[in-house]
Amino acid sequence: MRILRIHHVAIAVDEMGPLTQFLSSDLGLGTPYLETRPSSNLDIAMFAAGNAGVELLHPTGPGSSVPAFMAERGAGLFHVCFEVDDIVDAMAELTAKGLRFRTKEPQPGHHGTRVAFIDPASSGGVLFELLEAPAEAATHT
């Protein structure tokens, strides 16, 4: 397994407005990439920050782990995402080391990426995401 970079950090938010304003205007990160995921009941805003990103996750209903996280811990850092060169190999290597994943196979992510989340019980209580970019294009941060 080769980790290429921190792809993004994700922050769970009660509302997009204040943090979007802070990131785009105050910090100068500009206009985010916006996505609505009806299957997960999430609104997503992704800001480019150098060669990484800051992702805001706003739950619009049940369907993902974000509402449960926020009910327990409130808004804040949700996960750290590492870009890897081969997600299947990375999952196999980490599984062989005793780590568990939330799913057995990589799942579709944004812009043709494939993603997998390491079960926080395997990683010191912190949620980590692995992401593999599509071979034909660089990912949007």
Image (cartoon, grey):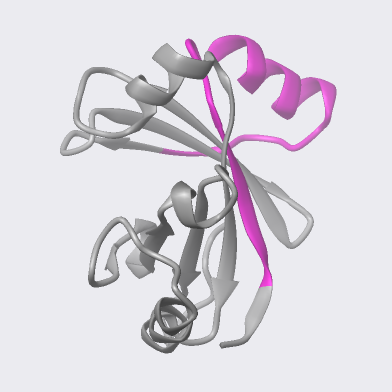
User: From this viewpoint, which residue is outermost toward the front?
Assistant: 98
Most foreground residue, 121 or 118: 121
User: From this viewpoint, which residue is outermost toward the right?
Assistant: 27
Identify the image quadrant of the C terminus: bottom right
Residue 45, given in percent of the width and then of the height, sits at: 50, 34
Above or below, 127 against 27 in this view is below
Most foreground residue, 30 or 9: 9
Left-right relation of 80 to 63: right
Examine the structure image and report whether residue 25 is included in the region drawn in magenta. yes
Residue 27, given in percent of the width and then of the height, sits at: 83, 29
The boundaries of the magenta stretch are 5-34
Examine the structure image and report whether residue 10 is included in the region drawn in magenta. yes
Residue 55, given in percent of the width and then of the height, sits at: 56, 40
- Residue at coordinates 71% horizontally, 28% vertically from top-left? 24
Residue 39, given in percent of the width and then of the height, sits at: 16, 38
Left-right relation of 22 to 97: right
Above or below, 90 against 10 in this view is below
- Residue at coordinates 28% horizontally, 18% vertically from top-left? 60
- Residue at coordinates 53% horizontally, 85% vertically from top-left? 85
- Residue at coordinates 32% horizontally, 30% vertically from top-left? 42
Left-right relation of 54 to 138: right
Identify the image quadrant of the N terminus: bottom right
